[in-house]
Image (cartoon, rainbow, N blue to C red):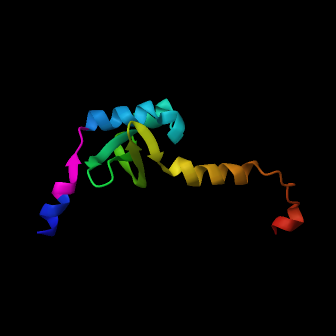
Amino acid sequence: MLFASANIMAQQLDVNTAKALAKKHAREIGLTQVDLLNSRVSDAYFDKASGATLVYLQQTYKGIDVFNAIQTLAFKNDKLVASPESVLHRWMRSQIQKKQRPLSLQETL
């Protein structure tokens, strides 16, 4: 019964439509053309409860899935509303860009 109710709240989305959404918003997500070529949509659906389209983008290498390399993307009204780039990557970039003096050889040992 629980499984049936989940199907009522979500509707599968065509893979080509999902890939087109990722491609359209690639810059916002932080994906390059090469990233898009080396990925596949592992799942995509429209969630009726939230009104969001969820796309699971799986990174691949030579057509083989990369373990634990899935980005969950959420779109609403054809706009990107959530992605890993929106939080984690921006924070990581800000940490990398902070100016720090190089460590001396003695400090690294």
- Whether residue 59 is visible to the viewer of this picture, yes or no, is no
| Coordinates of residue 41 in the picture (x, y in percent) | 32, 43
| Coordinates of residue 83 in the picture (x, y in percent) | 48, 49
| Coordinates of residue 91 in the picture (x, y in percent) | 64, 54
What residue lies at 16% left-to-right and 68% top-to-bottom? 2
**From the viewer's perspective, is residue 5 above or below residue 18?**
below
Count of numbered badges drawn on the protein: 0
**Dividing the image into 4 quarters, which one contains the C terminus?**
bottom right
In the image, 44: left or right of 58? Answer: left
**Dividing the image into 4 quarters, which one contains the N terminus?**
bottom left
| Coordinates of residue 66 in the picture (x, y in percent) | 40, 51
Q: Does the segment drawn in magenta span residue 81? A: no
What residue lies at 21% left-to-right and 46% top-to-bottom? 12
Nearer the observer, 105 or 4: 4
What residue lies at 35% left-to-right and 31% top-to-bottom? 20
Nearer the observer, 101 or 49: 49
What residue lies at 12% left-to-right and 62% top-to-bottom? 4
- Whether residue 54 is visible to the viewer of this picture, yes or no, is yes
Q: Magenta segment range?
A: 7-14
**From the viewer's perspective, is residue 19 above or below residue 10?**
above
**From the viewer's perspective, is residue 39 above or below residue 91?**
above
